[in-house]
Image (cartoon, grey):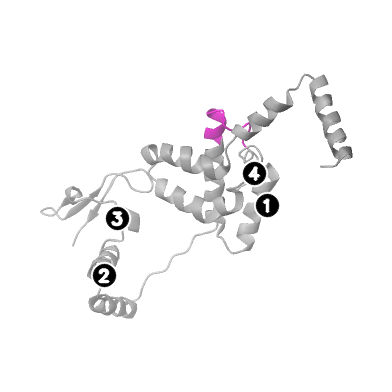
Amino acid sequence: MSLAEARQRANALRALIDQGIDPQAEKEKARAIPTLKQFAMDQYLRHVEDTKRSAKDDRSRLEHHLIPRFGKLGMGDITHQMVQRFLVESVKRGVAPATANRLRSLLHHMFSLAVQWEVAPRNPVHGVPKFQENNQRQRFLNKDEIRALCRALAEEPNTQAADFILLLLLTGARAGELLNSKHADLALEGGVWRLPRSKSGKSRNVILN
């Protein structure tokens, strides 16, 4: 830096010292705050993998949405305005309002833990409004579509994937419910598939034909 810039910097540091602020301590404190990517990978995901059923979803949302946008920023540098602008722009790019709300909830949960663990000074997601969700749609395959689907599944070389889709069609179950099921959940003699915990948080039975 030039001599003038050095004098200006020295005066600024002297002003901080006169206010009782240690510039070096503040610099080290700021350096100690991790970036969002560091916090997400080193602390948050390790925590939720043992406590949260949707940890895989969180990892996917982090890697595809949040880390590309905020990953290099320190946890203390992300502002309320940044979060709100990111969510609005995401919806404008075609992200569904429900997906944007899931991203907001993930960020909110991450910062709540960061504040609790004294990693971040504040939660910038507080007060960021949710989008109104209108995802209600209902459509059933007609008989011709079901026949066409079954023919395609019968010819599919990946028999495991074909059987998976056929089971979804026959039971009306969610993909996640089938993926997370174990053989012990099936009572074949009684023709019942027991789901101990569905998306709603309640157990239910699926009758097998």
How far apart are the alpha carbons under marks 3 and 2? 14 Å
Query: N-terminal of the two: label 1 or label 4?
Result: 1
Examine the structure image and report whether residue 121 is included in the region drawn in magenta. yes
Sort mark 2 into few (<14), some (14-19) or many (20+) by Cα contacts within 10 Å: some
Tag 4, which secondary structure? loop
Instruction: Report crowding for label 4: few under 14, some 14 to 19, many 20 or more residues within 10 A (C-alpha).
Output: some
Q: Which residues fall within the magenta stretch?
A: 112-123
| Residue 150 visible, this angle | yes
State the residue position of label 1.
85
> Residue 147: percent from the left, percent from the top?
28, 79
**Is 124 contained in the magenta span?**
no
- Give coordinates of residue 107: x percent, y percent: 55, 43
Question: Which residue is more in the foreground, 44 or 194?
Answer: 44
* Mark 2 touches mark 1? (CB < 8 Å): no
Can you identify the residue that label 2 sits on? 162
Distance (Cα) linking label 1 and label 3: 36 Å
- Residue drawn where x is 26% and y is 70% of the image: 162
Q: Which of marks 3 and 4 is nearer the N terminus?
A: 4
Q: Name the residue under label 3.
A: 179
